[in-house]
Image (tube, grey):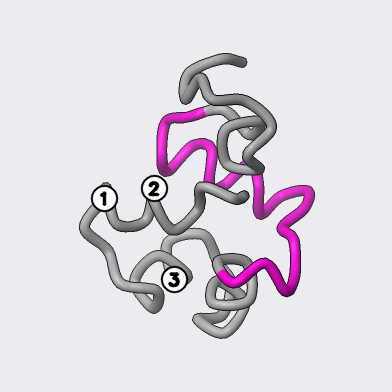
Amino acid sequence: MLNISYERQRLNLDQEQFAKKIGVSKSTVSRWERGIQFPYGSDLIAMRELCGCSIDWLLGVTNDRTQY
């Protein structure tokens, strides 16, 4: 399970605000959060920098938010 929604809510951002900060559309964030589409490349890096967590955490690969 992806942790993107958790991180967005932790930052107190709605999907549109989150999308703007990482340079994608609101619908893209919605598809990520519903598991319809997966982020990749520069989108993952932008989310990692915004959220201050690991890419593995964002993708649900690890339970450790800070493990790089």
Q: CA distance from mark 3 to mark 2?
A: 15 Å
Relative placement, left or right, of 9 versus 67 is left
Q: Which residue is mark 1?
A: 11
Determine whether 44 is above or below 22 in the image: above
Tell me which residue sits at (71%, 58%) in the image.
39
Q: Amino acid at mark 3?
A: Lys
Residue 40 sits inside the magenta stretch: yes
Determine whether 56 is above or below 8 in the image: above
Q: Residue 10 in the image: x percent, y percent?
A: 27, 48
The magenta span reads 34-53
Q: Earlier in the sequence, mark 1 or mark 3?
A: 1
Magenta residues, dominant SS class: helix
Quadrant housing residue 60: top right
Q: Residue 33 in the image: x percent, y percent?
A: 55, 66
- From the viewer's perspective, is the residue at label 1 or at label 3 nearer? 1
Q: Which residue is mark 2?
A: 7
Q: Earlier in the sequence, mark 3 or mark 2?
A: 2
Tell me which residue sits at (54%, 25%) in the image.
63
Q: CA distance from mark 1 to mark 3?
A: 14 Å
Q: Are marks 1 and 3 in contact (CB under 8 Å)?
A: no
Determine whether 62 is above or below 8 in the image: above
Q: Are marks 2 and 1 in contact (CB under 8 Å)?
A: yes
Relative placement, left or right, of 38 versus 44 is right
Q: Amino acid at mark 1?
A: Leu
Relative placement, left or right, of 34 versus 5 is right
Q: Residue 67 in the image: x percent, y percent?
A: 56, 15
Q: Which residue is mark 3?
A: 20
Q: Residue 56 in the image: x percent, y percent?
A: 66, 30
Q: State which quarter of the image contains the C terminus.
A: top right
